[in-house]
């Protein structure tokens, strides 16, 4: 009875022990009990990993010891494997064994076991072991980011890290203040664009750099001209436009209201005076557009046209003041006035004023000159009006007198001829004996007053 009870109790304890061993992940053979903590490790590439196995002897034998192995080492001691030898350290006592594996890589991913060597039985005992996964840090960024969006960058791994580290962030190699696995940019601006990486604080464990591309419309625009300085007609000139935008912009060159060119640069070969004016550059992309300030292009060239204006109409009175003014289409450094027939200039400025007299009367012209050439105006007359007036009055007076004389001569001759014809007609109509009768009729002694009047009337009529 007693023996049966003892056997039953022993079996019960053995079953209970086996259940506890399997529940905790421990495998036991011949009195060995092993437990791993943790059973799974996710570690960063380049980090140091620590694995522990806890054991106890059910049958104590001081000659027994432990080591670590993996499938890669063909279940041999890692210290004997050249691949692991310099990176492995063991620590432990009769209660536990610790494996410290340094600078882990993806090649180290495997299952690691505690091994127990029993000199007495020359047996090796294996168990479930510790699974090791190795991962890199990766920065996750949104595919499309527009300025003003709320953006979050995440430092990710392919497995859940067993030991949660403190993270840090870098942009373009410079440290940022964030200490979590997420970096918040809210709202994001074009200044946030750049190369980002996350890392473990205090360790040389960093992710590869990734680029955050922030899209935005043109924010600034500038124009330049080459060559700088004076632009001379006939030379080649290039205008260049620069704009801060993402994605790259399209450039248009505008003169006045007309588009004259496209592209970042606009070149004018053999530039002429008609190319002078104000130019603007317009940059645009899908997110907006911006117009530059006006760039004034002043093309220097020799005078091509010239005109003269004056304060009189060609003739003026002696003693009057006259002002001659010269104008040209080009930028002129020197205006010079000349009088025809004289070798020396009479005036060195754009306008020339003088008092008209007999010496100054004549024809004047202007010479416009700059660094690129010169042009001469047509001559204009400055004539004293009195000289022409006297001649005109004389000519008109002589002409009028001649006409009057001619009219008088014609009138007298016509009258004389008419009188002559009348007298000839009267001579033909009078009686030859009428002479005595006439004088008799006029005799006051022999005639009465009435007879005398009638006679005079008749004579007068015939005379007409």
Image (cartoon, grey):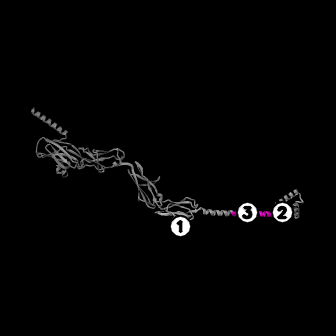
| Residue at image mark 3 | 408
Circle 1 is placed at which residue position? 342
Residue 440 screen position, x and y as percent? 88, 62
Contact, mark 1 vs mark 2 (Cβ under 8 Å):
no
x and y percent of residue 347 in the render? 51, 63
Residue in the foreground of this view, choosing between 103 and 362: 362
Alpha-carbon distance for marks 1 and 2? 79 Å
Cα separation, mark 1 vs mark 3, equals 52 Å
* Magenta region: 401-426
| Left or right relative to 380: residue 189 | left
Are the residues at dot 2 and dot 3 in contact (C-beta closer than 8 Å)?
no
- From the image, tell me which residue sits under label 2: 426
Element marked by disc 3 = helix
Q: Residue shown at 70%/63% (left/top)?
A: 403
Q: Secondary structure at mark 1?
A: loop
Distance (Cα) linking label 2 and label 3: 27 Å
């Amino acid at each position: 009875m007693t023996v049966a009870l003892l056997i039953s109790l022993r079996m019960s304890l053995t079953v209970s022990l086996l259940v506890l061993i399997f529940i905790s992940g421990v495998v036991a053979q011949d009195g060995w009990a092993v437990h791993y903590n943790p059973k799974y490790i996710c570690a960063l590439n380049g980090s140091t990993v620590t694995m522990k196995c806890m054991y106890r002897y059910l049958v104590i034998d001081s000659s027994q010891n432990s080591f670590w192995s993996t499938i890669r080492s063909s279940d041999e001691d890692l210290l004997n494997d050249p691949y692991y030898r310099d990176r492995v350290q063991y620590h432990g006592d009769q209660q536990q064994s610790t494996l410290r594996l340094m600078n882990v890589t993806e090649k180290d991913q495997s299952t690691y076991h505690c091994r127990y060597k029993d000199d007495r039985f020359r047996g090796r005992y294996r168990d479930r072991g510790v699974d090791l996964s190795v991962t890199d840090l990766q920065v996750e960024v949104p595919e499309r980011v527009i300025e003003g969006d709320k953006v979050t960058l995440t430092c990710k791994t392919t497995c859940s890290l067993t030991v949660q580290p403190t993270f840090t962030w870098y942009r373009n190699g410079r440290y940022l203040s964030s200490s979590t696995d997420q970096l918040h940019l809210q709202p994001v601006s074009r200044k946030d664009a750049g190369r980002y990486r996350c890392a473990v604080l205090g360790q040389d464990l960093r992710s590869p750099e990734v680029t955050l591309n922030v899209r935005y419309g043109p924010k600034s625009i500038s124009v330049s001209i080459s060559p700088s300085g004076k632009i001379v007609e006939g030379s080649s000139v290039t205008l260049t436009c620069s704009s801060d935008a993402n994605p790259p912009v399209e450039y248009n060159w505008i003169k006045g209201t007309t588009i004259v060119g496209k592209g970042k640069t606009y070149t004018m070969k053999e530039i002429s005076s008609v190319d002078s004016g104000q130019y603007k550059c317009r940059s645009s992309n899908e997110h907006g557009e911006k117009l530059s300030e006006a760039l004034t292009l002043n093309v220097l060239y020799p005078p091509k046209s010239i005109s003269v204006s004056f304060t009189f109409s060609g003739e003026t009175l002696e003693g009057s003041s006259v002002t001659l003014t010269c104008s040209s289409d080009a930028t002129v450094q020197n205006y010079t006035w000349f009088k025809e027939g004289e070798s020396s200039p009479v005036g060195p400025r754009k306008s020339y004023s003088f008092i008209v007299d007999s010496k100054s009367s004549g024809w004047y012209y202007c010479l416009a000159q700059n660094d690129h050439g010169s042009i001469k105006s047509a001559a204009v007359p400055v004539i004293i009006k009195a000289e022409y007036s006297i001649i005109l009055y004389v000519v008109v007076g002589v002409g009028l007198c001649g006409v009057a004389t001619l009219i008088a001569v014609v009138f007298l001759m016509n009258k004389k001829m008419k009188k002559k014809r009348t007298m000839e007609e009267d001579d033909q109509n009078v009686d030859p004996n009428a002479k005595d009768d006439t004088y008799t009729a006029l005799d006051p002694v022999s005639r009465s007053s009435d007879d005398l009047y009638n006679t005079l009337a008749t004579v007068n009529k015939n005379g007409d």
